[in-house]
């Protein structure tokens, strides 16, 4: 014990006497508030406002406060969910483009104060601020510059109003970590009843200098989000990914809100003049706002995992949107996926294997201890490995005692001194031979690479090009488990069935006799034929830990390769083939303006028919979905018998495939009529139509 203390003290003195100077900062640097923001990494967006109650994405400003009426609004439920998901903060749409305010602004009547919610005495911002405090989350605000409700929008008077509202938000709700300004600006709107189109000049109208000054004055620690910052930049898409090459730098003066150069935001600018890192904003559902019809379209686990790696893993932050529903709660389906993502990410990064290695570097600054390579694995973000001035390429080798399986590498630059690395490679030694794992460009605050599992004794990271002496604070290695997800099945018109899972290391086992699949069942290798009524059951299996999913099941019926669309006539529609192409993501829409709302199909030969299936149009803006149907069967395409009629219950909100059985009847021709359509539209649409014959099942 005594000896250990002496050694430590000697080491400490040795290190503190080390006079090697730190590298000079290089290029634009992050401010302290930006460094604090980099640490947040993963936080929630909440789109909840008037649109939640009008089922819109953009309201036009003519909505009435009476329409805002959540019945169970509970910001603590939001905060608990966000905390449990591993996020560090939340940004709320205090005011969206329709102008409705979630707080009782003193400057407008268009707010919660005139809504039925809490008889007008409520304040969503206040409730969220309290919940954030209770759950130790940071809070941010989204304030739309564009306001389609305000009568003076487009004139100087509105800009004063906008600034006043900003002051309210920044003074009444405690600390704010981010102020979010949208790039969508100007256009048509209600504007106090004028109902016209108003254009503004994005660069000058809002007096951005004044806006920035207000934020600096009232919330000096808040970063400002905008297309071009000044604190944090948009990433140039709403899908949750940055380019692999991603600089925290931007030629700021070339970018303004609504910039046509937004594609460049995905990478930033290597020669940027300012530190303006990227934030990836993406919704967990197709829409930003809640729509009951999207309850079944919450992003899959593998999609969310991909988003995580392509945002946080590519030197950006992840702002994941949760559309709070019209009860005022985060929906159960969204919570389930958020927690699944959390569990997977926790597993992926459960154990940093690099701490078991010996780390050496081909160059260490001044050969000193202060910048030695072991800082890369000391878990301390304040210490770093650095090279001598002028040394812009160098390798780090991490050596294991024994062969170790890895498939992730995480790298961090010491960004307080600037972003420097321009190119690097990762190699691993397998059975004594070096193998190139990956060749990449930027690192920045954080870079994570995924690769096939390799059993290795040494990993080598070579920085091959940097703007100045290299400064890296962290290298971590992980062995993430395979990603186990339910198998998916598709069948083409010829009956070829394809089974798939997200991770190529996962095995699939299946049966076609109705029995439960096990690892003794058929193993899926390539597409196979199912050309008659068959129940397919398949499960995914992880050979790593012998865990399998429960079985998924599909009922396939006869194949469609000899089916023909008779109506609409070939000349009337080129898209009608999509009704029977076995792809639910393609669709046919009947001619607008025509009052004929039916299709007729020749099945090629006579079958004993026991029912039909109707898959409605999928996607974000479906149109022409049938709610009330009539279904007819014929043997000669002249004499028709109606065999079923009724309603597809709740199809607007839950647009899944409908399966309608009827009493068995022989027939060769079928006719589906759309009697009533969602929102009383005149046209009807079909993504896929099928029949149930259910005859002898294939074994
Ligand atoms: C966009 C807005 O127009 C959307 O409605 C949404 O708020 C998204 C985050 O930003 O530009």
Image (cartoon, helix red, strand yellow):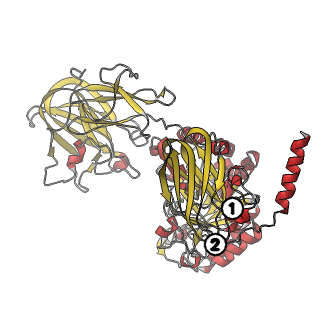
Give the percent coordinates (x, y) of residue 432.
51, 44
Give whichever of discs 1 and 2 has the lower sequence position: 1
- Asked where in the image residue 466 lies, by quadrant, the reply is bottom right
User: Which residue lies under the disc numbered 2?
Assistant: 390
- Asked where in the image residue 206 lies, by quadrant, the reply is bottom right
Give the percent coordinates (x, y) of residue 481.
53, 37
Q: Is residue 304 above or below residue 610?
A: below
Q: Is residue 334 above or below residue 185?
A: above
- Asked where in the image residue 14 lies, by quadrant, the reply is bottom right
Is the CB–ligand 1 distance for label 2 below 8 Å? no
Give the percent coordinates (x, y) of residue 88.
68, 50
Is the CB–ligand 1 distance for label 1 below 8 Å? no
- For the C terminus, the quadrant is top left
| Along the line of sight, the residue nearer the viewer: 85 or 141 | 85
| Along the line of sight, the residue nearer the viewer: 504 or 111 | 504
Q: Residues within 10 Å of mark 1 (few under 14, many from 20)?
A: many
User: Which residue lies under the disc numbered 1?
Assistant: 364
Can residue 625 be seen from the camera position used here? yes
Q: Residues within 10 Å of mark 2 (few under 14, many from 20)?
A: few
| Along the line of sight, the residue nearer the viewer: 418 or 81 | 418
Name the residue: 26% across, 40% down. 582
Q: Are marks 1 and 2 in contact (CB under 8 Å)?
A: no
Q: CA distance from mark 1 to mark 2?
A: 12 Å
Name the residue: 82% across, 58% down. 15
Name the residue: 34% across, 49% down. 680
Side of 295 where 347 appears, left or right: right
């Amino acid at each position: 014990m005594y000896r250990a203390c002496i050694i430590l003290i000697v080491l400490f003195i040795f290190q503190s006497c080390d006079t090697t100077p730190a590298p000079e900062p290089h290029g634009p640097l992050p401010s302290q508030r930006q460094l604090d923001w980099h640490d947040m990494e993963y936080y929630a967006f909440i789109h909840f406002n008037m649109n939640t109650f009008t089922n819109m994405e953009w309201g036009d400003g003519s909505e009435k406060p009476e329409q805002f009426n959540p019945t169970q609004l509970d910001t603590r439920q939001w905060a608990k969910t966000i905390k449990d998901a591993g996020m560090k903060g939340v940004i709320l749409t205090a005011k969206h483009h329709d102008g409705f305010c979630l707080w009782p602004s003193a400057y407008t009547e268009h707010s919660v104060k005139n809504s039925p919610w809490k008889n007008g005495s409520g304040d969503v911002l206040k409730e969220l601020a309290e919940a954030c405090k209770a759950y130790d989350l940071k809070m941010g605000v989204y304030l739309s510059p564009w306001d389609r409700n305000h009568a003076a929008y487009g004139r100087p008077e509105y800009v004063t109003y906008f600034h006043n509202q900003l002051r309210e938000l920044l003074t009444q709700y405690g600390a704010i970590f981010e102020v979010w300004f949208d790039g969508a600006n100007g256009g048509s709107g209600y504007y106090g009843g004028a109902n016209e189109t108003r254009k503004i000049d994005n660069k000058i109208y809002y007096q951005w200098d004044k806006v920035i000054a207000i934020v600096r004055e009232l919330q000096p620690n808040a970063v400002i989000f905008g297309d071009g910052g000044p604190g944090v930049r948009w990433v140039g898409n709403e899908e949750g990914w940055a380019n692999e090459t991603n600089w925290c730098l931007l030629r700021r003066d070339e970018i303004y809100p609504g910039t046509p150069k937004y594609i460049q935001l995905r990478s930033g600018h290597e020669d940027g003049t300012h530190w303006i890192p990227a934030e990836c904003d993406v919704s967990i559902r197709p829409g930003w706002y809640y729509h009951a019809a999207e309850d079944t379209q919450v992003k899959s686990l593998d999609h969310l995992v991909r988003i995580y790696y392509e945002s946080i893993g590519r030197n950006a932050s992840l702002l994941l949107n949760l559309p709070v529903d019209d009860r005022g709660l985060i929906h159960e389906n969204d919570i389930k996926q958020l927690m699944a993502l959390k569990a997977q990410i926790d597993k992926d990064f459960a154990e940093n294997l690099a701490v078991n290695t010996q780390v050496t570097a081909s160059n260490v600054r001044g050969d000193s201890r202060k910048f030695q390579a072991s800082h890369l694995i000391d878990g301390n973000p304040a210490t770093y490995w650095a090279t001598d001035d002028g040394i812009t390429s160098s390798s780090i080798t991490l050596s294991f005692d024994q062969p170790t399986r890895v498939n992730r590498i995480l790298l961090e630059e010491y960004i307080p001194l600037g972003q420097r690395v321009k190119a690097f490679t990762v190699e691993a030694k397998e059975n004594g031979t070096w193998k190139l794992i990956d060749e990449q460009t930027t690192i920045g605050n954080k870079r994570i690479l995924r690769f096939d599992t390799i059993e290795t004794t040494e990993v080598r990271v070579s920085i091959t090009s940097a703007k100045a002496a290299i400064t890296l604070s962290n290298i971590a290695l992980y062995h993430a488990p395979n990603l186990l997800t339910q198998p998916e099945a598709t069948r083409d018109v010829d009956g070829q069935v394809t089974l798939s899972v997200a991770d190529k290391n996962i095995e699939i086992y299946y049966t076609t006799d109705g029995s439960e699949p096990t690892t003794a069942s058929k193993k899926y290798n390539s597409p196979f034929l199912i050309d008659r009524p068959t129940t397919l059951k398949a499960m995914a299996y992880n050979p790593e830990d012998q865990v399998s999913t429960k079985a998924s099941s599909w009922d396939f019926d006869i194949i469609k390769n000899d089916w023909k669309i008779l109506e609409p006539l070939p000349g009337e529609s080129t898209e009608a083939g999509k009704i029977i192409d076995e792809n639910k993501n393609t669709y046919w829409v009947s001619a607008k303006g025509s009052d004929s709302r039916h299709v007729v199909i020749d099945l090629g030969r006579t079958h004993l028919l026991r029912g039909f299936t109707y898959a409605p149009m999928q996607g974000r803006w479906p149109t022409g979905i049938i709610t009330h149907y009539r279904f007819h069967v014929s043997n000669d395409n002249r004499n028709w018998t109606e065999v079923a009629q009724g309603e597809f219950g709740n199809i607007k909100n839950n647009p899944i495939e409908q399966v309608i059985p009827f009493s068995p009847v022989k027939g060769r021709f079928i006719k589906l009529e759309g009697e009533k359509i969602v929102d009383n539209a005149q046209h009807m649409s079909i993504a896929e139509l099928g029949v149930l014959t259910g005859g002898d099942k294939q074994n």
